[in-house]
Image (cartoon, helix red, strand yellow):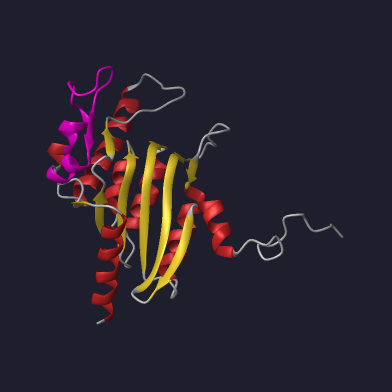
Amino acid sequence: MSEPTKSGTPEESGTSESTQNILDFGSALTRTPYGSVYCLSIIGQIEGHMAASNGTKTTKYEHVLPLLAKLEESDEVDGVLFLLNTVGGDVEAGLAIAELIAGMTKPTVSIVLGGSHSIGVPLAVAAQHSFAVPSAAMTIHPVRMSGTVIAAPQTYSYFQRLQERIVAFVSGHSHISAQQFQDLMLNKEDMAADVGSVIYGEEAVKLGLIDEVGGLSDGLAYLYREIARRRS
């Protein structure tokens, strides 16, 4: 019979389950008289089918997907708050997370803190209501792919169709038109050594990409209002 590991269960190691969730996933469940809100951080690089290099902070989609499904079905959770500070990452993994967030029926709010770049943009707009702090940045650019790329018409067609999926998702879950978003994506003047745009909190709201400028208190207030409305 194998011996138990030194870490043991959270209780055995003197760490509560909620504290362990913060350490492992950057998440926490807070119970208040207004409702129970689950806070989930989406940070660093969105990791896809390939593991990121050592030392890179990541959000692993294989952890987030089942967690979101569990939150949707949990009687203990009334609403979900997403805190975003991501550089982007794997496009299909990011879209998978965004689609699952968009499909949730419980009240959801996203807050862009620091940045929500590249595939982080669909993640920011996936929640039912989105906020961005004034200093938040969002980089919008065409789809990129690393590794071996076959110079064939099918490859360029795949890139185009993947880009169309992103444009359709963002325009479908925000107040920006598909043409406006594509223009930002293909802008040649804003980035010195690249194609695309960098927009900040208030600008993102004016463009219709983000719903409101606001921070933590604004996000929580919106969630509590929605929870109360659904209870009544």
Foreground pick, 108 / 96? 108
How many numbered circles does the render carry? 0
Question: In which quadrant of the rendered image does the N terminus lie?
Answer: bottom right
Residue 159: image location, x then y, percent: 31, 31
Q: Is residue 127 left or right of residue 203?
A: right
In the rendered structure, which segment of residues is drawn in magenta? 181-206
Residue at left offset 36%, top offset 54%: 82
Q: Identify whether 107 is placed above or below 176.
A: below
| On screen, residue 74 above or below 119 | below
**Left or right: where 90 falls relative to 230:** right
Is residue 91 visible in the rendered structure shown here? no
Give the image location of residue 181, x and y in percent. Answer: 18, 38
Residue reaching furthest to the bottom: 232
State the image coordinates of residue 188 (x, y, percent, origin top left).
Answer: 18, 21
Asked whether 42 or 214 is in front, the reply is 214
Tell me what residue is drawn at x 36 percent, y 77 percent. 33
- Is 188 in the magenta? yes
Height in image: 97 above or below 160?
below
Visible residue check, residue 19: yes
Tell me residue 11's x, y (percent): 67, 66
Quadrant of the image containing the C terminus: bottom left
Q: Nearer the viewer, residue 229 or 15?
A: 15
Q: Give the quadrant of residue 4.
A: bottom right
Q: Residue at x 37, y 51 (%)?
A: 83
Q: Quadrant of residue 151?
A: top left
Residue at 13%, 37% (x, y): give it. Answer: 180
